[in-house]
Structures are given as C-alpha cells and as structure tokens.
Image (cartoon, rainbow, N blue to C red):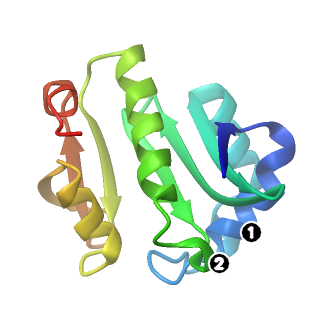
Amino acid sequence: MMIREAKPEDIPQIQRVRNSVKENTLSDPGLVTDEDCSEFLFQRGKGWVCEIEDEIVGFSIADLKGNNIWALFVHPDFENRGIGRKLHDIMLDWYFEQNKDSVWLGTSPGTRAEIFYRKSGWKEMGIHGKGEIKFEITFKNWKNKVV
C-alpha cells in the first residue's frame, strides 16, 4: 500500500473509486466532472491517493479555499484496511499546516462515514445541503488528537 499526492493522470481512477462506493453515492455520476476534480486537486487544495499494485483504491481531497474536505473515499473491495484513516490523517495534517481555520465536511446520516468522523474527533454542527450532517474539526481538536 502506498499513499502519495494525486497527479492529473489519476483523475480517471479517482472517478472510478468515487462512483464505486455503496454509501454517500452521487445521484448522478455526471455531477462531479473531471474538471471539478482537477480544480479541487490543483487549484483549490490538494489530494492524495492510495495505490495497491498500481491501482488507486482510495483518495482524499482537501479544499483550502472553502475550508472543506471535498472527498474521502475508499473502493468497497478495499475497506477495513486502514486506508481511509491514513488518507484522512495525511489530509488533515497537511490542511492544518497550511492554516489553522476549522475545516468542515458533510456526510449522509446513518452511514459508516458518520461513525468514522465522530470517532475521529469531528463535531456535529447541524444539517448541510440535502440532509447531510455537517461536521467540523478545529486545529486545537486535531492537534490534541489521541494517536
């Protein structure tokens, strides 16, 4: 397993992973374009991918402009291997190296993602978008995380 920064040529595999998930699915896969991915990866923030045998099996993207976690997804065939945790931690370490502003994300209620974020120190801040739970984590809470 190797985690590295995302490159432009990773976008097709990132899209494949995004569209393979069973929770937090897109109602229309066309809603997130390759151009959207490129903008969030290289203009608004940064992203990371997890590769196993040259195949991208997970990715994360932080949006500095919006103080938002734009994406964190792992292909269903590769869940429960610690990939999401590693991508999450690398992404947040980088985010808080760039600035100390709180960061937020939205996820569907009743999902494993909701449980993951709660266990990771994220605090529920209400409802966002189309019924998603809005979570936030502060620099202080991240800095003081239990390893």
Task: Please tell me in which quadrant of the rendered image residue 58 appears.
Answer: bottom right
Residue ID at (34%, 68%): 113
127 w.r.t. 93: above or below: below
Residue 51 image position (x, y, % from top left): 72, 53
Residue ID at (39%, 28%): 93
Q: What element carries label 2?
A: loop
Tag 2 residue: 20
15 w.r.t. 130: above or below: above
121 w.r.t. 131: above or below: above
Q: Residue 121 carries which label?
A: none
Mark 2 and mark 1: Cα distance apart in space? 6 Å
Task: Decide: few, some or many residues near mark 1? Use Cα within 10 Å; few <14, some 14-19, many ≥20.
Answer: some
In the picture, measured across the screen, residue 34 lies left or right of residue 29, that is right
In the picture, measured across the screen, residue 68 lies left or right of residue 143, that is right
Q: Nearer the viewer, residue 68 or 92?
A: 92
Q: Nearer the viewer, residue 90 or 27?
A: 90
Total label count? 2
Task: Please tell me in which quadrant of the rendered image residue 32 appears.
Answer: bottom right
134 w.r.t. 104: above or below: below
Q: Which of 139 and 43 is in front in this view?
A: 139
Three-letter residue code for mark 2: Ser
Residue 105 image position (x, y, % from top left): 33, 50
Indicate the quadrant containing the C terminus: top left, top right, bottom left or bottom right. top left
Residue 83 image position (x, y, % from top left): 52, 57
Query: Are the residues at dot 2 and dot 1 in contact (C-beta closer than 8 Å)?
Result: yes
Residue ID at (24%, 81%): 110
Three-letter residue code for mark 1: Arg
Q: Which mark is residue 16?
A: 1
Residue ID at (54%, 48%): 60
In the picture, measured across the screen, residue 123 lies left or right of residue 85, that is left
Q: What element carries label 1?
A: helix
